[in-house]
Amino acid sequence: MLTLYDSVGWEGYTRDVDKLCRGLLNSHLVITARDGSGTLLGLARTVSDDEHICYVQDVVVNPAFHRQGVGRALIEDLMPRYSHCRFFLLSTDHEASPEGKRNHAFYRSLGFLSYEEKEMAGFGLPRNRPDLRVAAP
């Protein structure tokens, strides 16, 4: 798993292997894509109450296997498993970021809409970016 996360440069995950393992263990579901010899090509994991919401936490595909249907297969495997949930959500890079445009096109090709298009908003606390924190009123 560490090699896969390293391959996409997710240092926030790979700096602390124990934390990465706990995150995977605490996931609602972890699915993997492997080739015929068992080599790990990609992984997707969810956080869910399995009733109302499913949040796709990670979709990670080794760059050597990008644009070969691995990510699509992972998401298409997850979608019917959570079709009973009211929300099936994920977050990805901003469209203006280096990865964003490609990621947005990929998720749109699977039927995803932006939060704005769904008349929703997403919020987060920038815990790892103190420069972005806003003082509470």
Image: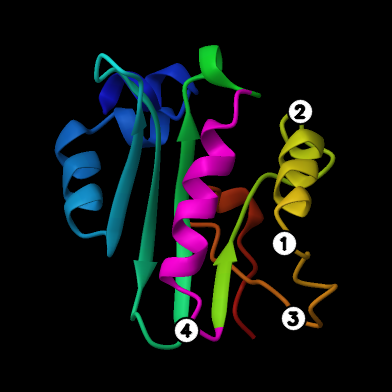
Q: Is mark 1 on a helix, strand or loop?
A: loop
The answer to which quarter of the image holds residue 78 is bottom left
Q: Earlier in the sequence, mark 3 or mark 2?
A: 2
Measuring from the top left, give residue 30's x and y in whole percent: 29, 50
- The quarter of the image holding the C terminus is bottom right
Image height check: is 94 above or below 85? above
What residue is pinned by disc 4?
84
Q: Which of 101 and 88 is in front in this view?
A: 88
Numbered range of the magenta stretch: 68-86
Give the residue type at disc 1.
Phe
Q: Main secondary structure of the magenta part?
A: helix
What residue is pinned by disc 1?
112
Give the residue type at disc 2.
Pro
Asked if disc 4 and disc 1 are in contact, CB closer than 8 Å, the reply is no
What residue is pinned by disc 3?
120
What residue is pinned by disc 2?
98
Give the residue type at disc 3.
Met
Q: Report the side of 34 relative to 18 (left or right).
A: right
The answer to which quarter of the image holds residue 72 is top right
Q: Which of marks 4 and 1 is nearer the N terminus?
A: 4
The Cα atoms of the two marked residues, 3 and 2, are separated by 25 Å
The Cα atoms of the two marked residues, 1 and 2, are separated by 20 Å
Asked if disc 1 and disc 2 are in contact, CB closer than 8 Å, the reply is no
Q: Report the side of 20 relative to 34 (left or right).
A: left
Q: Which of marks 3 and 1 is nearer the N terminus?
A: 1
